[in-house]
Image (cartoon, helix red, strand yellow):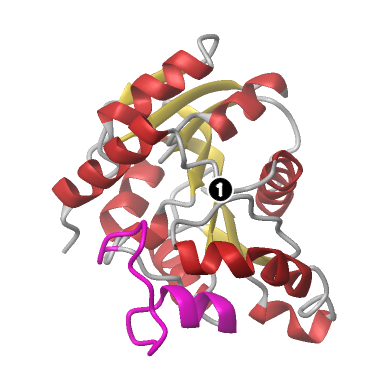
């Protein structure tokens, strides 16, 4: 079960320090474009950015012409997002009980959110509820099948670091996550992404070796046969136009 209070405390702290935009600008844009591509979101529409944090991805979507609403559990993060990107809409909200009517959006982005949820089923159900028939979702999360993500961020690893995270967080398994959405009724596609340039990590030790990691990640898993071991899982899908059954 997710300890939401710990999540709020952590991200309120990040908001005060303004340290949570961990990727370079080029990498953030690349992640978003890959997410849109995997989900088949080919034109601007109404979109909810769930787990929007400091609003970076919401702002990129806005610049691309989307009618975007950013949502985050952390009041501190929402205040920071509103300060940094005043043209965008942001609301405090729980992804397991969203403050939106049924069929409110054409698309949903889950911004590095699902790996914070020990059981994402309630969030998946809410994504289904707020999407219109034919609507699409897309999500990006660290990949447990990537050796670096496993060693650094999985609790079962002997090298696990809890710096900058709560015990709620764990890299995802692509097939398990895809099954969560498939069971809800979504048509699901999975992609994988590496060559992501980090500009910040919480651990002081890891910050020292960050340039080496960025260099390794730029080529190590580039062969197609190694794609399932890339650093991030991109999960995308479509809500059918008519109910299944």
Q: Nearer the viewer, residue 234 or 44?
A: 234
Q: Residue at x 52, y 15 (%)?
A: 88
Q: Residue at x 39, y 46 (%)?
A: 128
Q: Is residue 219 above or below residue 232?
A: below
> Horizontally, is 101 left or right of 238 in the view?
left
Q: Residue at x 69, y 44 (%)?
A: 24
Q: Nearer the viewer, residue 209 or 87?
A: 209
Q: Is residue 113 visible?
A: yes
Q: Is residue 183 above or below residue 116?
A: below
Q: Nearer the viewer, residue 14 or 128?
A: 14
Instruction: Kindly identify which residue carries mark 1.
Output: 22
Is label 1 in a helix, a strand or a loop?
loop
Q: Residue at x 71, y 56 (%)?
A: 197
- On the image, the x and y values in percent for residue 19 come to 46, 40
For the stretch drawn in magenta, the main secondary structure is loop
> Horizontally, is 35 left or right of 6 in the view?
right
Q: Which residue range is magenta in the image?
A: 146-168
């Amino acid at each position: 079960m997710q300890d939401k209070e710990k999540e709020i405390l952590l991200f309120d702290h990040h908001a005060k320090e303004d340290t949570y935009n961990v990727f370079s600008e080029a990498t953030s844009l690349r992640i978003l474009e890959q997410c849109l591509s995997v989900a088949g979101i080919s034109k601007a529409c109404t979109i909810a950015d769930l787990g929007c944090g400091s609003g970076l991805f919401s702002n990129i979507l806005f610049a691309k012409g989307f009618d975007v609403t950013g949502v985050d559990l952390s009041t501190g993060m929402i205040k920071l997002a509103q300060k940094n990107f005043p043209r965008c809409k942001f609301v405090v909200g729980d992804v397991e009980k969203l403050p939106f009517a049924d069929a409110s959006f054409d698309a949903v982005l889950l911004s590095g959110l699902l790996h914070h949820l020990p059981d994402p089923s309630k969030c998946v159900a809410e994504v289904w509820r707020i999407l219109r028939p034919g609507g699409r979702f897309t999500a990006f999360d660290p990949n447990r099948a990537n050796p670096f993500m496993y060693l650094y961020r999985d609790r079962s690893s002997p090298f696990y670091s809890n710096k900058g995270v709560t015990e709620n967080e764990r890299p995802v398994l692509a097939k398990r996550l895809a099954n969560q959405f498939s069971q809800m009724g979504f048509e699901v596609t999975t992609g994988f992404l590496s060559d992501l340039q980090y500009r910040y990590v919480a651990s002081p030790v890891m910050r020292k070796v960050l340039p080496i990691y960025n260099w390794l990640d730029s080529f190590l898993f580039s062969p197609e046969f190694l794609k399932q071991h890339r650093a991030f899982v991109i999960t995308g899908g479509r809500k059918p136009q008519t109910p299944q059954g």
